[in-house]
């Protein structure tokens, strides 16, 4: 119920905000040379002549019937547009997350098990470096090296199986930096626990103790962070998608805002909100699945 | 727990496999052109943006075209003015054909313009053709246009691409599936950022690829993923590419007119003395040399001197800070009471850079200017509503002098026209009306030149420069020539260099 109220709040807020910012979609569609009568006819045809509260009510009524409407510009159903773009963003997000985990896990592990050593400082230095580099700079830099100097990947676009590598690396390295720090601190906490001492006392080697007992326990808080990161990525990695001309949800929203294509912006933001709620729900469920100590029964 | 983590990874990989997919690549032999903005509407009756207009030129034939000096010349048809309100157009042989092999006829012309005038079509160009009272098809290749009142510029409006009448009747979605008789055929639109056309004479595929970021467009050209770029690059990237031996560079004087607009209802810039002071305070020559890399020509009027109404004799406002200070003083401003202005522009980094240079130059003469940059929709909305003191914009693709009425007549304040600065000058209005009522070209030319002198004196716009058109291509292709108005007609002749010729193309040629 609270999720529904949250969603209603988000869609209403977005509806009023996008309609309140200056700029008229009719101007973008017809230019300034169109006849006043044609402008008015188009405005009426699109229902933009109605009072704002009436447009809002019509929008909510349609939404309740799962009708997202049509793009003001292309006239295409918005469901079709979202179904085209969401898998593209999902694909990039998952690979970026994998890249992040592949980089962050060994770094965090190394930093925690060799605390205050050169490995620790090196790993955390990398993490700081990764967090500090903005994606709009990292992207072109990776293009320069990966596409231009080495010629291994395409510069941008979605053509070819390897086109995802550079945008995923751009997003992944930034996420890896945060994840590595989280893994390190979480692991350091677990390494001091009694059950780990017991495991070692029972004859497990350090590596076995870390991989079998410490790491799975340390990863639980990391999972929350991963959920949040994935939610953010699915909301559209706007800068990365722009740099790499990756035709995902982020690029769709940017173009729709520029054109004042209200129905697309509204539907895309709704989609992002739902995604956040779902990813958070999924994270909670995964928590319970991974850690038997957590259950959903209310305390007596 | 370790088992559960393994299951989680498996689930993750499964999800990944569901989303795995990449768009289909065009064949290797395709020539690719990088664009900052993709064409949005492939129906010439509806398109308003420059990329759509340029692509539609390739897909559709039109009755009339323009010579280098922007005088109307025959394209599909020659014409004669039988009376000032009666024009007869004769389609020239051989007439082009539509993809189904049918020849373009006068009926197609009539249906195209009839549908354009139909309010149901909601064409943004309908206003331009309101003067047509009726059309009459005399034969397969002759059509008469009757006007409500004389307009000597009428033939130059007939540049809309002609659609096949049979498809107009069934409301064919031309905007996404164009059917024309131009030198190119619509081939494929794999997604919103890609459009592939096929050249009729040899089946050469040309792909338009939208890449928003100019640095990435440059890198794609260097990597050979696209073969040609035209305009929309910051000057430093143009210079960088032009110096690269693997890139061919060409530039041509353009007609893109950059200007600063003033709000004539504003108490400060509404004063002609202040506008003239600003004109003298801005060192346009230096901006062209250093910020634009020398790839622009100083402008004194809306049309360049090469245009048939171009006014090459206009002298303009030389950079003279002392004169600017003197004019400000005459306007009642002193060092203690200096004018403070707001300059509005878009968020484009290059336009912002230009704004900061102008800000610095105005500061030198004692004008304090703050820069307000907004996203395009907000900026454009403010300009239309008259919420500005100064703004900078550019006119692209101006051809006909009817723009003077549209932009400077006192009755053309938005939404009736684009007189955004609320400029009112009885002499300007009179000159516009006089020019419109004259049928003799020489007389029209003289009046329009007087009008441009008046505009330069009263400064509704401060003319800045005409930006050059630049084209940068890889050495894998040849034959492309850049045009004055930045259209893509050069794609008619673009070819692979001999070492990269694709022989299969000849076999696929359209008869």
Image: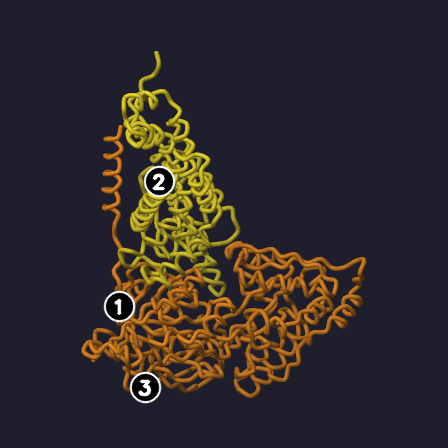
Q: Which residue is drawn at 43% across and 37% down?
A: A181
Disc 3 vs disc 1: which is toward the camera?
1
Q: Mark 3 points at which residue?
A: B92
Whether labels 2 and 3 share one chain: no
Q: Nearer the viewer, mark 2 or mark 1?
A: 2
Label 3, label 1: how far apart the Cα atoms are: 27 Å
Q: Mark 1 lies on which chain?
A: B
The answer to whether residue B222 is above or below residue B249 is: above
Across and down, in percent, residue A242 comes to 41, 55
Q: Do the residues labelled 2 and 3 touch (CB within 8 Å)?
A: no
- Which residue position is annotated with label 2? A106
The chain letter of the yellow chain reads A
Q: Residue at x 57, y 77 (%)?
A: B297
Contact, CB < 8 Å: mark 2 with mark 1? no
Q: How many numbered marks does the figure carry?
A: 3
Q: How is the image coloured?
A: by chain
Q: Position of residue A5 (x, y in %)?
A: 41, 31
Nearer to me, B86 or A265: A265
At 23% from the left and 46% from the top, the residue drawn is: B17
């Amino acid at each position: 119920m609270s999720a529904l109220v949250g969603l209603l709040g988000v869609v209403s807020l977005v509806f009023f905000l996008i309609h309140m910012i200056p700029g008229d979609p009719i101007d973008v569609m017809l230019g300034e040379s169109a006849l006043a009568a044609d402008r008015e006819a188009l405005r009426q045809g699109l229902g933009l002549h109605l009072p704002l509260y009436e447009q809002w009510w019509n929008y909510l009524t349609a939404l309740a019937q799962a009708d997202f409407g049509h793009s003001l510009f292309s006239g295409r159903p918005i469901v079709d547009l979202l179904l085209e773009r969401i898998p593209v963003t999902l694909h990039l997000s998952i690979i970026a997350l994998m890249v992040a985990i592949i980089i962050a896990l060994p770094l965090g592990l190394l930093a925690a098990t060799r605390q205050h050593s050169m490995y620790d400082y090196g790993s955390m230095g990398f993490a700081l470096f990764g967090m500090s580099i903005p994606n709009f700079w990292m992207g072109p830099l990776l293009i320069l090296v990966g596409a231009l100097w080495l010629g291994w990947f395409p510069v941008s676009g979605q053509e070819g199986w390897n086109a995802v590598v550079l945008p995923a690396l751009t997003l992944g390295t930034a996420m890896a930096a945060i994840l590595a720090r989280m893994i390190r601190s979480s692991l350091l906490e677990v390494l001091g626990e009694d059950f780990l001492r017991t495991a070692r006392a029972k004859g497990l080697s350090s590596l076995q103790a870390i991989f079998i007992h410490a790491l799975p326990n340390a990863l639980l808080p990391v999972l929350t962070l991963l959920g949040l990161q994935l939610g953010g990525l699915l909301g559209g990695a706007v800068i990365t998608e722009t740099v790499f001309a990756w035709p995902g949800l982020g690029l769709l929203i940017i173009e729709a805002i520029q054109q004042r294509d209200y129905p697309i912006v509204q539907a895309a933001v709704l989609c992002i909100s739902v995604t956040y709620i779902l990813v958070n729900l999924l994270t909670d469920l995964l928590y319970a699945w991974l850690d038997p100590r957590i259950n959903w029964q209310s305390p007596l | 727990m370790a088992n559960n983590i393994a299951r989680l990874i498996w689930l993750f990989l499964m999800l990944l496999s569901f989303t795995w997919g990449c768009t289909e690549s065009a064949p290797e032999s395709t020539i690719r052109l990088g664009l900052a903005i993709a064409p949005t509407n492939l129906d010439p009756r509806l398109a308003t943006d420059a990329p759509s207009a340029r692509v539609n030129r390739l897909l559709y034939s039109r009755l009339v075209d323009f010579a280098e000096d922007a005088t109307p010349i025959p394209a599909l048809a020659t014409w004669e003015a039988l009376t000032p309100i009666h024009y007869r157009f004769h389609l020239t042989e051989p007439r082009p054909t539509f993809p189904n092999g049918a020849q373009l006829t006068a009926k197609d012309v009539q249906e195209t313009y009839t549908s354009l005038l139909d309010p149901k079509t909601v064409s943004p160009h309908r206003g331009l053709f309101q003067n047509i009272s009726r059309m009459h098809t005399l034969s397969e290749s002759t059509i008469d246009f009757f006007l409500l009142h004389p307009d000597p510029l009428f033939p130059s409006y007939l540049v809309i691409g002609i659609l096949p009448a049979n498809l107009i009747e069934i409301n064919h979605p031309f905007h996404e599936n164009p059917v024309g008789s131009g030198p190119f055929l619509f081939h494929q639109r794999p997604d919103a950022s890609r459009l592939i056309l096929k050249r009729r004479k040899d089946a050469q595929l040309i792909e338009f690829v939208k890449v928003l970021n100019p640095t990435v467009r440059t890198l794609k050209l260097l990597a050979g993923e696209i073969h040609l770029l035209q305009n929309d690059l910051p000057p430093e990237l143009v210079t960088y590419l032009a110096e690269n031996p693997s890139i061919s560079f060409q530039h041509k004087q353009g007609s893109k007119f950059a200007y600063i607009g003033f709000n004539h209802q504003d108490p400060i810039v509404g004063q002609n003395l202040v506008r003239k002071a600003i004109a003298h305070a801005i060192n346009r020559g230096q901006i062209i040399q250093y910020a634009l890399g020398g790839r622009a020509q100083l402008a004194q009027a809306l049309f360049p001197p090469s245009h048939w109404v171009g006014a090459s004799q206009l002298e303009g406002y030389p950079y003279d800070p002392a004169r600017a200070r003197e004019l400000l003083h005459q306007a009642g401003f002193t060092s203690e009471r200096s004018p403070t202005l707001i300059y509005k522009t878009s968020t484009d980094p290059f336009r912002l850079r230009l704004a900061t240079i102008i800000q610095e130059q105005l500061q030198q003469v004692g004008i304090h200017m703050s820069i307000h940059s907004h996203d395009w929709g907000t900026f454009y909305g403010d300009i239309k509503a008259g919420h500005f003191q100064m703004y900078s914009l550019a006119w692209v693709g101006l051809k006909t002098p009817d723009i003077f009425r549209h932009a400077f007549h006192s009755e053309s304040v938005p939404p009736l026209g684009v007189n955004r600065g609320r400029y009112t000058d009885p002499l300007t209005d009179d000159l516009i009306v006089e020019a419109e009522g004259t049928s003799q070209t020489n007389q029209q030319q003289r009046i329009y030149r007087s009008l441009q002198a008046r505009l330069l004196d009263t400064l509704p716009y401060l003319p800045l420069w005409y930006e050059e058109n630049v084209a940068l291509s890889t050495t894998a292709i040849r034959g492309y020539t850049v045009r004055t108005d930045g259209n893509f007609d050069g794609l008619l002749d673009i070819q692979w260099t001999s070492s990269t010729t694709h022989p299969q193309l000849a076999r696929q040629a359209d008869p």
